[in-house]
Image (tube, rainbow, N blue to C red):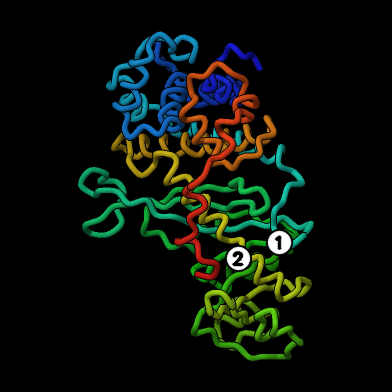
Amino acid sequence: MNCGKYIFSQIMELASYKQFMTLVNRHSGDYRIKDFSCWKQFLCMSFGQLTHRESLSDTLMCLRANADKLYHLGIGEPVANSTLTRANENRSFRIYEDLAMLLIKQAKSLYIGDSDLEVHLKNNVFAIDSTTIDLCLSTFYWAIFRSTKGGIKLHTQIDLKTSIPEFIFFSNANLQDVNVLDLVTYEANSIYVMDRGYVDYKRLYRIQLSDAFFVTRTKDNMDFRRLYSRTVDKKKGLLFDQTIRLNGFYSSRYYPDKMRRIKFKDDETGKVLIFLTNNFHLKALEVAQLYKHRWKIELFFKWVKQHLKIKSFWGQSENAVKTQVWIAISVYVLVAIAKKKFMLKQSLYEILQIISISIFERIPINQLFQETRFVQLQDFKESNHNQLKLWE
C-alpha cells in the first residue's frame, strides 16, 4: 500500500473501479454526465458514511473544508448540494445494489473457512430476518405502512459463520416477513435459522424438499401429536426432545413429514423456548445454540443503523433512499474486506471508529491499526448487551 495515500483512498481502492464502471455502463449511470460521475457520487456518499456525517449538507460542508485534499480523494472540485441531491434522486440505485452484491461476493471468498459458532459444523448456517426503517409519510409518500406512518423493511439473509449478508430485499413495511421465504434460493445441507414469524408449514416444507434444514420457534397454537421422545440432559437446560407430526387438516398436508420439537430453559434469564426443526442429526443443545446465534443478524441491523447513516435520509424519493442504504451496505462490506485483507484484529465497529477519525491520515492501514494510541479502546457500543438478551 502506498503510504502517500489517504486512509479514505485506501479503503475505496478495495472496490474495483473497473468493475464499478461496468455496472455504471450497464445502467447508463453516466449518460450525458459531464463532470460529477457516479464514481464521485459513490465517493461523496461513502465519505459521509465513514465520517459519521448527519446529512448531505454536513457531508459536503466537510468536503469543502478540505478542498485542497479532494483531488487526492478522487472527487476533484467541491460539490454543490444540488448536484449530489439530483444524482441521488435520478441515478439508478441498482448501480449501488449491484456493487454491494459484488462486494459481498468478494468478502465471502475472503472469509471461507472462518467461523466463530459454538457449534462446529461443515454445513452453511444462515439467519433470515428483517428490520423496519420508519419514515415520515408526509415526506416519503411512496413508503406506505399505516394510515399515518411510512416505512420500509430491509429483509436480510446473513451467513452466521462470517456475518456477511447473502441476500437483501427491500419492501414496504407492511409486507409480512414470511412472504420473503418465496424469494430465497435454498442450498442443500444448509441450515436456516428464523424466528417464529416465519413459521408457515408450506414454506418450511419447501426447505425440506430442498434437502436443507430449518431451525425456528413453535407457535403457541400449534396442533400436533407426539410420536416418541429422546433422553435429554436436564442439567444443560433441556426439558424434552420430541419427534412429532402435525394434526391440522391443512397443516398436515402442507407439511406431511416428521419434525423435531425441543424445549429448552435458559438458566440465566429463566426463559423457556420451544424449537422446531427438521434436522434429526444435530444434538438438542446444538439446536438451541444455533438459535442463539440468530442474534448476529440483529447485531448486523444494529451496527448498520447505528454506525452508518440510514436512520436519517439524505433524499426523499424511493431511488434516493435505496441509493443511500445500498451504499451504506457497501461501506459495511468494504470494512469487512479491509479487516480481512489487512489482517486487522479489531472488530468492525472499532475499525470504523478509527477510520472515521483518521480519514485524512497518510499511513498504510495495517500500520494505522498497530499504533499504540488505538490499543486501549474501551466503552464501545457493541459491548452494551442490554438490548441483546440471549433468548428474547
For the residue labelled by badge 2, is the local secondary structure a helix, a strand or a loop? helix
Asked whether the beta carbons under mark 2 and mark 1 sit within 8 Å of each other, the answer is yes
Q: Residues within 10 Å of mark 1 (few under 14, many from 20)?
A: few
Residue type at numbered disc 1: Glu
Asked if 44 appears above or below 186 in the picture, the reply is above
The front one of 150 and 341 is 341
Q: Is residue 243 visible?
A: no
| Residue occupying the point 68% across, 52% down | 161
Displayed quadrant of residue 34: top left
Q: Horizontally, is 254 left or right of 210 in the view?
A: left
Counting from the top left corner in percent of width and height, residue 355 is at: 51, 30
Asked if 97 appears above or below 142 in the picture, the reply is above
Counting from the top left corner in percent of width and height, residue 321 is at: 37, 39
Which residue position holds label 1? 118
| Residue occupying the point 52% across, 50% down | 300
Location of the N terminus by quadrant is top right
**Residue 254, disc:** none
Which residue position holds label 2? 292
Q: Horizontally, is 75 left or right of 125 in the view?
A: left
Counting from the top left corner in percent of width and height, residue 237 is at: 65, 80
Q: What whole-number distance in Å separates the C-alpha atoms at marks 2 and 1?
A: 10 Å
Displayed quadrant of residue 194: bottom right
Residue type at numbered disc 2: Lys
Q: How crowded is mark 2: few (under 14 residues within 10 Å), some or many (20 or more)?
A: some
Q: Horizontally, is 339 left or right of 385 in the view?
A: right
| Residue occupying the point 29% across, 48% down | 135
For the residue labelled by badge 1, is the local secondary structure a helix, a strand or a loop? loop
Q: What is the number of callouts on the image? A: 2
The front one of 180 and 62 is 62
